Structure formats: structure tokens, C-alpha cells
Image: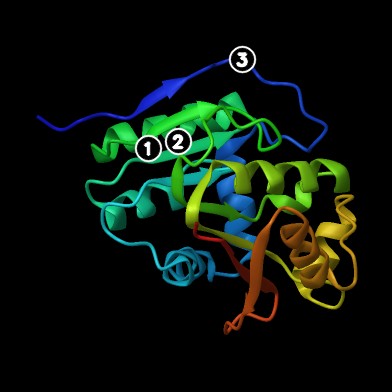
Amino acid sequence: MAKTARTHAHSAPHTRGSVIHWPRLYDVFTGVLGMGSRSAVRVATLDHAELRLGERVLDVGCGPGTVTLLAKERAGSGEVFGIDASPEMIERATDKAAKAGADVTFQTAVIEELPFPDGSFDLAISSFMLHHLPEDVRQAGISEVARVLKPGGRLLAVDLTGKGSLAWRVMSLFGHKLPDSYAEHLSDMMRVAGLAPQIQTSEWRSYLFISAGKEAR
């Protein structure tokens, strides 16, 4: 008998970050904004993360759970968790996982206050969510991710690039003002959190991939 997805905490937690409450429209909007590249970018996300069988994975700001489910496919027997501040997104993600028969745990929570003990995960993924946060919340969230990573664990952050890209111009219309040197901005925050960031190259000029490892003890 296939295991089913689990979900916890249905109420919306307090956060000063932007919270998206319309998961179906979000899927449509991101598909249009990505101009057909989003499926490939999701696969590239896990490639850049170098996700391995048996790893314990956290998808931070998982949205409707698409990347989370792909992560579970690669992790195999490894436990996979997805958190998001939007109860609607968590409900949508749980439904997707149940239909797929995927054993994934989804929980309503915020990046700046992760409900997990220190050193819980081998890998954390943040996919197109950090730009939704005020700067101080972004720093707090990255520090929280560092806290829940195991020694030797890593964060893979995927986001928009800075000034000049099409995605940057579109998101500016929705109030998301990214620093011109956004890659360096995120890298500095990761260093403050005790991580060692490395900006990775990709074929998409509008998207940014940063891997950041936690020192092994």
C-alpha cells in the first residue's frame, strides 16, 4: 500500500514576508513568466543541489510542492519535508503528493522560525522565494536554514537575478525591488549565517543558482 503525504499546522503563521494564497493561479503565472522553462529549471535545481539517495531534504517555501515531489523521487528512502507560510499552498502540495502516492511531509511554517531541531537536514532547497522577504527576515531565514542543516549539509538557493533581466523587471512591477547585485547580496547573507556560498553558472540569464555548504565538524 502506497504511503500518503502528511500535513500539519493549517493556520497561517505570522510573517512580514509576502504570502501567496492562490496556488492554482500561481502555477499559471510562473509558467507564463518562465516562458516554458520552469520544468527544466526545476530539474536543474535538483541537479545543482546534487541531491543523493537517502538524504533528508527540506524544501523551504515549497509553494504547491512541485520541486518537493521531484526531490522525493531523487531522495528515494530519504525523508523529504516542505514548508510554506501559505496554508493554501500546503493544502495544494499535500493533494498533489497524495495523488502521486509520495511520502512527503508538508507543514505550514515560516523560514525565519523553522520548526525543526538543529542539524536535521542534509540539504535545504529555496526556490524563488527569498525575494519575497524583507531584508532582515531574509537574513534571519538564511540563518535558520544554516541552523537546521547538518555539519557538511548544504543549501541550494534558486532565485531571480538582479537588474536587467526580464524577470527582474516583471517582479519590480509587483513591488519586489531586488538589489542590482542580488547574487552578491545573497552570498553575503549566507556568509553571515556561517555558510560558504558559491554562485553556479547556468543557461538561464534570468535565474540565479547559489550553493552554500555548512562546514563539516
Res 79 → quadrant: top left
In three-dimensional space, the C-alpha distance between marks 3 and 2, rounded to whole angstroms, equals 15 Å
Total labels: the figure holds 3
Residue at (63, 34) in percent of width and height: 22
Asked if residue 166 lies left or right of residue 120, the reply is right
Is the residue marked by circle 3 packed among few (<14), some (14-19), or many (20+) residues within 10 Å?
Answer: few
Q: Which residue is mark 3?
A: 11
Point out residue 16 in the picture as x, y percentages from the top left corner.
83, 32
Say what amino acid the circle numbered 3 marks: Ser
Which mark's residue is nearer the viewer, 3 or 2? 3
Location of the N terminus by quadrant is top left
Q: Which residue is mark 1?
A: 96
Point out residue 64 in the picture as x, y percentages from the top left corner.
51, 41
| Numbered label attached to residue 129 | none
Residue at (51, 68) in percent of width and height: 41
Say what amino acid the circle numbered 1 marks: Lys
Say what amino acid the circle numbered 2 marks: Ala
In three-dimensional space, the C-alpha distance between marks 2 and 1, rounded to whole angstroms, equals 5 Å
Circles 2 and 1 in contact, beta carbons < 8 Å: yes
In three-dimensional space, the C-alpha distance between marks 3 and 1, rounded to whole angstroms, equals 20 Å
Secondary element at image label 1: helix
Q: Nearer the viewer, residue 167 or 82?
A: 82
Secondary element at image label 2: helix
Residue at (28, 36) in percent of width and height: 103
Asked if residue 114 lies left or right of residue 2, the reply is right
Secondary element at image label 3: loop
Q: Earlier in the sequence, mark 3 or mark 2?
A: 3
Q: Which residue is mark 2?
A: 93
Q: Is residue 217 above or below residue 16?
A: below
